[in-house]
Amino acid sequence: MQSTPHPFAALSPARVVAAIESLGFWLPGEPFTLNSYENRVFLLHDDEGRRWVAKFYRPARWSDAQIQEEHDFLDELAEEGVAVAPPWRDEAGRSLHHAEGFRLALFPQLSGQAPELENPSHLFALGELIGAVHAIGERAGFRQRVRLDLDGMVREAQQRVLTAPWLDRRQRQAYERISEALHGALQAHAWAPHQEIRVQGDCHIGNLLGRDDAFSLVDFDDAMMAPAVQDLWMFLTAEHEAEWHMQLSEVLEGYEQHREFERRELTLIEPLRTLRLMRHSAWLVARWDDPAFPPAFPWVADAGYWDSHIRQLEQQRLALGRTPRWLA
């Protein structure tokens, strides 16, 4: 029996154009597909020369209400002068649109390059940008978006990976053992709900665009309630202690132009790194029926990938037991 085609398989270029033109735009050229896997994202320009990014949301991932909270948060940030791309709204004020069987939104294109994380002025600017986001993010809470839940998300990732068909018996046993150990170790790092604010949620350098010392933050698809450090820890990439402390110092100096940072949250860096590693592999397993994934991530079906992933998790178990770098 033939499996049901994935919904994104029906998103042809003609369908993309028809969906966008149904909103009142006219496209003189074909949209350009951008590098995105969770959703489908296209760069386009209209007949007035304006450049847009069109996001077609993955079916069944978020509810309309959750997506609307993402959009409303972006509007709130933009109104306060924070460098983000708020969604386009039609004459009725709608930012989430339904066309050709998909949900979509349009955002003005923001140009620029990714920051250099060894550049002190870039780090200061990134900290300042995230501090501005969080100063507004702490004014209220999301009602519909998810919260960062260490316990639940680790359990979900673990269960998803254990369904993967590519792990042999040895790997399955090793993964189950290390994931259980990590789940136990992470229980000591839980935080109280009052420590959570609205954050971008997936703050890697691919979501930051700019030049010189001015950057914009894009893609709030993973916006959530979480501790502030969730949007900062991925900037701290240096291997050597002196360079790592330089990165931390510059980021926090910029951040505290807008909002005080609670240093105790730095103890969450390794737990959050652990969670991200586990969720990434689980995400690949969960999305394997999407036709874009097998050709983009062919190594997931290779035994070597899972051996490497298990070793990474073993290293994270050791990292969780070490003295935090900011105290070293």
Image (spheres, rainbow, N blue to C red):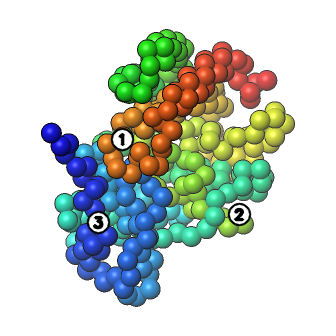
- In the drawing, does residue 229 fall left or right of residue 195? right
Callout 1: SS? loop
Which image quarter: residue 216?
A: bottom right
- Residue 123 position in % (x across, y down): 71, 51
For the point 29% across and 55% down, which residue is it?
A: 8
Mark nearest the camera among 2 and 3 is 3
- Residue 259 position in % (x across, y down): 61, 46
Please tell me how crowded label 3 is: few (under 14), some (14-19), or many (20+) other residues with Cα within 10 Å.
few
Task: Let me know if residue 23 appears in the view.
Answer: no
| Dot placed on the residue nearer the N-terminal end, 1 or 3 | 3
Residue of label 3? 12
Residue 60 versus residue 41 in the image, above or below = above
Residue 213 tag number: 2
Identity, as a three-letter code, of the amino acid under mark 2: Asp
- Residue 208 position in % (x across, y down): 58, 57
Do the CB atoms of the residues marked 1 and 3 lie less than 8 Å apart? no
Quarter the N terminus occupies: top left
Identity, as a three-letter code, of the amino acid under mark 1: Arg
In front of the other: 228 or 49: 49
In front of the other: 294 or 84: 294
Number of labels in the image equals 3
| Dot placed on the residue nearer the N-terminal end, 2 or 3 | 3
